[in-house]
Amino acid sequence: QVRLVESGGGLVQPGGSLRLSCAASGFISNIKTMGWYRQAPGKERDLVAVITSGGVTNYADSVKGRFTISRDKNTVALQMSSLKPEDTAVYYCNAYGPANYWGKGTLVTVSS
């Protein structure tokens, strides 16, 4: 089992920045990729960004150039800049390898 704990969500004004962090514990030696997904009200959960154990990253088109994912051992972070109201969602940390694991989520609200 892998446990994921997110932190860093909150309220931010449009154009602002926010940093999310996720710490993994448990059987972390088999984790291959870690990443972030988000789910806005009434919508499906979508990929935001993922990073492999080798440092290869993949971003949703909507966040390219604004968000940066990074990983350090069992921690993955998401630096979010130039935030827009449409970035408002619950952000979930994900770890894969060989099973899929999810954190409980952290709410990010972008509003003036």
Image (cartoon, rainbow, N blue to C red):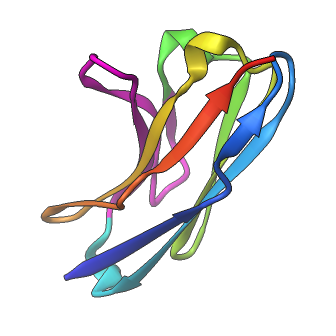
Query: Which range of residues does the magenta coloring cover?
Result: 32-58
Q: Position of residue 5 (x, y in %)?
A: 46, 71
> Residue at point 86% right, 17% down?
15
**Residue most extreme to the left:** 99
Q: Quadrant of residue 82?
A: top right
Please state which of residues 29 and 10 is positioned toward the viewer in this rendering: 10
Q: Is residue 56 magenta?
A: yes
Q: Position of residue 93 (x, y in %)?
A: 42, 53
Q: Position of residue 16 (x, y in %)?
A: 86, 27
State whether the magenta stretch is mostly helix, strand or loop.
strand
Q: Is residue 21 visible?
A: yes
Q: Is residue 42 magenta?
A: yes
> Residue at point 41% right, 55% down?
34
From this view, report whether residue 49 is shown above or below residue 27: above
From this view, report whether residue 10 is shown above or below residue 27: above
**Which quadrant of the figure contains the C terminus?**
top right
Q: Is residue 79 visible?
A: no
**Which quadrant of the figure contains the N terminus?**
bottom left
Q: Quadrant of residue 17?
A: top right
Please state which of residues 58 and 54 is positioned toward the viewer in this rendering: 58
**Residue most extreme to the front:** 112
> Residue at point 74% right, 48% down?
19
Q: Position of residue 97 (x, y in %)?
A: 22, 64
From this view, report whether residue 102 is shown above or below residue 50: below
- The image shows a total of numbered marks equal to 0
Taking 98 as reference, is 103 left or right? right
**Residue most extreme to the bottom:** 26
Taking 1 as reference, is 80 left or right? right
> Residue at point 34% right, 81% down?
28
